[in-house]
Image (cartoon, rainbow, N blue to C red):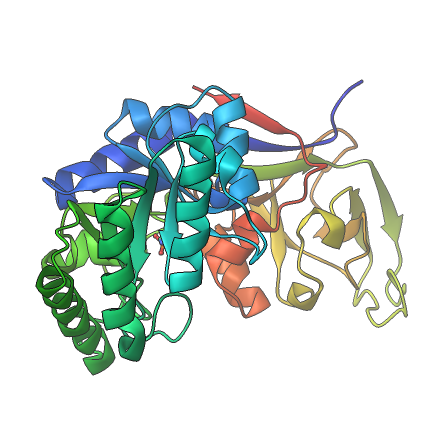
Amino acid sequence: MTAMTEAVIDLAAIAHNARVLAATAGPAGMMAVVKANGFGHGAPQIARTALDHGATWLGVASVAEALALRAQGLTAPTLCWLYSPAETFDEVLQADIDVSAGSVTALEALAAAAERTGLVANVHLKLDTGMSRGGAPVEEWSELFTWARKLSDAGLLHIRGLWSHLANAEDRSDPGLHTQLREFDLGREAAAVAGLDPPILHLANSAAALHLPPARHDLMRAGIALYGIEPVPGQTFGLRPAMTVRAQILLTKRVPAGTGVSYGPDFYTDRETTLALVPLGFADGVPRVAAGQAALSVGGVRCPIAGRVSMDQIVLDVGDLPVRAGDWAVMFGPGDQGEPTAGEWAGWAGTNPHEILTGIGARVPRRYLS
Ligand SMILES: Cc1ncc(COP(=O)(O)O)c(C=O)c1O
């Protein structure tokens, strides 16, 4: 079988980005955030590369993602932070996976798993410092710490980390960001009052790791910067985008002015032109909403999408370019050959680059450059 689409993942770029993060945010350690299949790049491949170039931890959202890393032979310290209220954690403890806990209920479930398995649960207490998403709200910190201390004294839990997440680390002028930094410090003091001294404090995502030293603490959790997207608007840290998505043109046709293209149609050619069929659609991660603005690059020339994005295909208006079946159309890449970047797609689709990267569908084969 010959693939007609591919996402080429440049592991040298991942290695470079990991080194930039480690050099900038050190001596803080680095957790490589490889949830959502490594932001679409392939979790085990990204994890191995990041660990070889400065990462010391792996971070994922779900228990299933953490167990998959273990099954793939990754033994580095790993934290997961989302699980069902019915999760029993036995398998998690047996796989030596650290778990985030932001409630007494979660601590009790972890302690019960520790009793059943005869293992100690490694726990990172999650504080809500102002994002109002995960983590214990401030009113519950005292109870959370009291129970954490009790279950830790009983030998069931090891309170290994204290952590939180920032809502807007990109903008150092945001007062909410500074409130979160202060709240985290207060949380750490309250934990100490309860007799807890978690050895690993972590708060920073990519943006904070790169430009907000007070947020670095012991460990940063690096996601988007690891994949090469600059996280701080107006500032560059020399990161290199790692993913290029491209597809072969399947056929071309010369059409007269006034030709309707794709569903509807709500697009008509404005002149005689060549149309090129590309086998990427919204099931592959081409956002439907981007049609009308988005372009792919063919031989370094940007060619707009003509008409609506279908599930599996798009049509490019390539004008008079001498394009032939078998030529490659680049959806996005690092941008150094004139192709669009994931950031530009995010602008066209009214979203962030994270959604563009993670949206690249499973049927687009990943090919790794090492
Ligand atoms: C809890 C947590 N920490 C860290 C990250 C990484 O954030 P970023 O991609 O901004 O580096 C994420 C990603 O969304 C996250 O959910």
Quadrant occupied by the C terminus: top left
Please indicate, yes or no, whether residue 281 appears anywhere in the rendered image.
no
- Quadrant of residue 160 in the image? top left
Question: Residue 42: where, in percent of width, then height?
Answer: 53, 33
Q: Decide which of 249, 37 is in the foreground and name it.
A: 37
Quadrant occupied by the N terminus: top right
Figure check: 282 above or below 366: below
Figure check: 14 above or below 339: above
- Quadrant of residue 232 in the image? bottom left
Q: Decide which of 301, 356 is in the foreground and name it.
A: 356
Whether residue 307 sits left or right of residue 55 in the image: it is right
Question: Residue 138: where, in percent of width, then height?
Answer: 27, 76
Whether residue 279 sits left or right of residue 122 in the image: it is right
Quarter of the displayed picture in which ligand 1 can be seen: bottom left
Question: Residue 293: where, in percent of width, then height?
Answer: 62, 66
| Residue at x 46% of width, y 41% of height | 113
